[in-house]
Image (tube, rainbow, N blue to C red):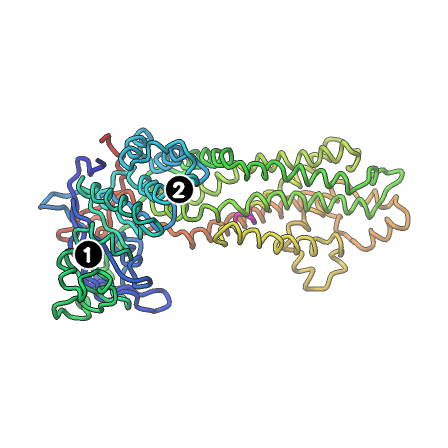
């Protein structure tokens, strides 16, 4: 049984919790949480929208209440302790493409715990028989247990679960709640939310949250059933106040409004268990394994450049860069589509990366994840693939006489331009992937990002010929700068001057678009890539904020750093690796 190890058990309680949402709505008011200690399972029940998840997040320290106090203390008069705890949201928080054992091992490495504990956790949860299967092939109940397994790797003394039986059939739900009872019997304090009445029979203590976020009935399951009008839990879901004449609304005492950490329950911030370099190594390895195990994504990653290169070879005729018989208009189109191909490679690789694992990112941000190493790992894995695709594009077109017959410096310049264009597009894709919530939305965003890059690149309508608004928009288009840098690197000005009337007309239309050296475009493209990566980090930081403290480390005490409140546990920045059962 996964227990608390050498540390004492902990007791959790709360009084007078009032939570106000950013819009000003009062979501929770006057909520008291009965004491939950080791060996006990506390169920928070209520209808949809009552505020169960919000209350759970307040108890876990993920939200700071406006009023009230959350208290975590050593159980049974124990001394000071550094509680460890975990939070399991409703979403699946495991990469579906990875084998279950591999996913748990990477989670352990990322948290700084021992991957050797994974087999023990799998045994505890009855998942050893499916450890080698991809997570996507597991049943709903098995995936729920897999999400719990990740939190158990740090041997939590407090475990919070949001709707753990949601979506499960009655048998799977009963098996999961029975496991949670065994986990509690091992010394873990378990708190869960549920809207399933059957789950409440397995709890030691049940509290209801009324539909308006006020306190509902509370007590042992048998006691609540005796107080129910028809002897069922269902009749208690709409009760607005505790039965037996208790007050309908419990306001926190005035002193609870004090914003100091001791009164507000606002926890201290904790450092991740692993440093940025270690996280980058672990995340890079995991992304490589994801690419390897997700065969469809791997096929698209490798196959899409090959298809596009083949289309380019069929679209353009050879010899358009021949100085003796140049084709100025065709050469401009070749350069534009090379620039757009590099842009498309990067964008198509970046768009699916984050939105498909957003739930995992949210969970890892609550524990240890740093966004810098996370984004850098994406670049580390996808960057070499992009460079290979760009190099292959230029080599094939040159071998088929669709590129100028020039020396190595010219081709190196063209490759540098396409590489930077691809990385800028990859950064744009990552930023947009962080904005959307699922891969289907990312697919809808793809054409919206591509059309402006085509229309305002300056290839079909030269920049000097655009309206004033179009010229300003073109400044923000990475394709414009890639197109102009390619033209400068290939010296199309000299080629067009030998192209007769057609070439002179193009020179007049494009003006000085190719009059600057390629490095100007490189600097702009590199700046765009850095700015877009910064934007992706900001978006991810807003959508997946780090908790005020780090789960899997210290528990949500009510004391500020160095000032433990009376009866509460002091807090620590350390993560403790799980010991052997």
349, 477: nearer the viewer: 349
Residue 247 in view of the camera: yes
Q: Is residue 530 left or right of residue 129?
A: right
Dot placed on the residue nearer the N-terminal end, 1 or 2:
2
Label 2 SS: loop
Q: In the rendered view of the protein, which quadrant contains the N terminus?
A: top left
Q: Main secondary structure of the magenta part?
A: helix
Residue 291, position as x, y percentages in the image: 51, 36
Q: How packed is label 2: few (under 14 Cα within 10 Å), some, or many (20 or more)? A: many
Which residues fall within the magenta stretch? 427-431
Taking 332 as reference, is 417 left or right?
left
Task: Answer yes or no: is residue 258 visible.
Answer: no
Residue 452 to residue 213: above or below: above
Residue 516 marker? none
Give yes or no for residue 576 being in the magenta stretch.
Answer: no
Percent x, y of residue 78: 11, 43
Along the line of sight, the residue nearer the viewer: 416 or 512:
416
Residue linked to disc 2: 94
Q: Is residue 28 left or right of residue 429?
A: left
Q: CA distance from mark 1 to mark 2?
A: 29 Å
Give the residue drawn at x 69%, y 60%.
471
Where, by quadrant of the figure, is residue 182 drawn?
top left
Dot 1, crowdedness within 10 Å: few (<14), some or many (≥20)?
many
- Residue furthest to the left in view is 77
* Residue on which the image places disc 1: 206
| Location of residue 58 with respect to 305 vertically, above or below | below
């Amino acid at each position: 049984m996964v227990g608390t190890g050498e540390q004492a058990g902990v007791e959790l309680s709360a009084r007078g919790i009032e939570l106000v949402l950013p819009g000003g709505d009062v979501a929770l008011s006057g909520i008291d949480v009965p004491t939950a200690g080791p060996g006990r399972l506390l169920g928070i029940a209520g209808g949809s929208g009552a505020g169960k998840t919000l209350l759970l997040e307040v108890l876990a320290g993920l939200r700071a209440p406006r009023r009230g106090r959350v208290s975590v203390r050593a159980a049974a008069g124990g001394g000071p302790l550094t509680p460890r705890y975990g939070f399991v949201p409703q979403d699946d928080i495991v990469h579906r493409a990875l084998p279950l054992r591999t996913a748990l091992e990477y989670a352990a490495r990322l948290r700084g715990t021992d991957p050797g504990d994974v087999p023990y956790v799998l045994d505890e949860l009855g998942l050893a028989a499916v450890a080698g299967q991809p997570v996507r092939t597991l049943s709903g109940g098995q995936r729920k247990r897999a999400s719990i397994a990740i939190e158990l790797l740090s041997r939590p003394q407090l475990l919070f679960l949001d709707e753990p039986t949601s979506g499960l059939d009655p048998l799977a739900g009963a098996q999961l709640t029975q496991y949670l009872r065994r986990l509690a019997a091992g010394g873990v304090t378990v708190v869960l939310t549920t809207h399933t009445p059957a789950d409440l029979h397995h709890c030691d203590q049940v509290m209801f949250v009324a539909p308006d976020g006020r306190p509902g009935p509370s007590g042992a399951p048998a006691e609540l059933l005796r107080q129910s009008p028809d002897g069922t839990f269902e009749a208690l879901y709409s009760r607005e106040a505790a039965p037996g004449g208790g007050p309908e609304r419990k306001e926190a005492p005035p002193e609870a409004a004090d914003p100091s950490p001791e009164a507000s329950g606002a926890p201290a911030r904790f450092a991740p268990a692993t440093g940025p370099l270690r996280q980058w190594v672990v995340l890079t390895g995991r992304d490589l394994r994801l690419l390897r195990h997700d065969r469809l994504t791997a096929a698209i990653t490798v196959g899409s450049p090959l298809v596009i290169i083949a289309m380019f070879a069929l679209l353009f005729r050879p010899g358009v860069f021949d100085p003796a018989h140049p084709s100025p208009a065709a050469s401009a189109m070749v350069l534009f589509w090379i620039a757009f191909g590099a842009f498309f490679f990067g964008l198509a690789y970046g768009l699916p990366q984050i939105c498909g694992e957003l739930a995992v990112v949210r969970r890892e941000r609550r524990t240890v994840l740093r966004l810098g190493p996370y984004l850098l790992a994406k670049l580390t894995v996808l960057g070499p693939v992009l460079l290979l695709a760009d190099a292959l594009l230029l080599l094939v077109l040159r071998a088929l006489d669709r590129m100028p017959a020039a020396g190595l410096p010219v081709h190196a310049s063209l490759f540098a331009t396409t590489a930077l264009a691809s990385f800028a597009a990859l950064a744009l894709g990552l930023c947009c992937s962080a904005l959307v919530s699922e891969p289907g939305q990312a697919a809808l965003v793809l054409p919206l990002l591509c059309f402006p890059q085509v229309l305002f690149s300056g290839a079909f309508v030269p920049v000097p010929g655009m309206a004033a608004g179009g010229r300003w928009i073109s400044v923000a288009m990475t394709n414009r700068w890639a197109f102009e840098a390619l033209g400068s690197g290939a010296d199309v000005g000299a080629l067009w001057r030998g192209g007769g009337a057609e070439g002179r007309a193009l020179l007049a239309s494009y003006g000085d678009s190719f009059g600057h050296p390629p490095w100007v475009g490189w600097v702009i493209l590199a700046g765009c890539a850095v700015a877009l990566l910064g934007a992706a980090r900001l978006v991810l930081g807003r959508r997946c904020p780090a908790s005020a403290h780090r789960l899997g480390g210290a528990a949500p005490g009510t004391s500020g750093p160095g000032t433990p409140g009376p009866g509460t546990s002091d807090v620590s920045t350390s993560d403790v690796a799980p010991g052997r059962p």
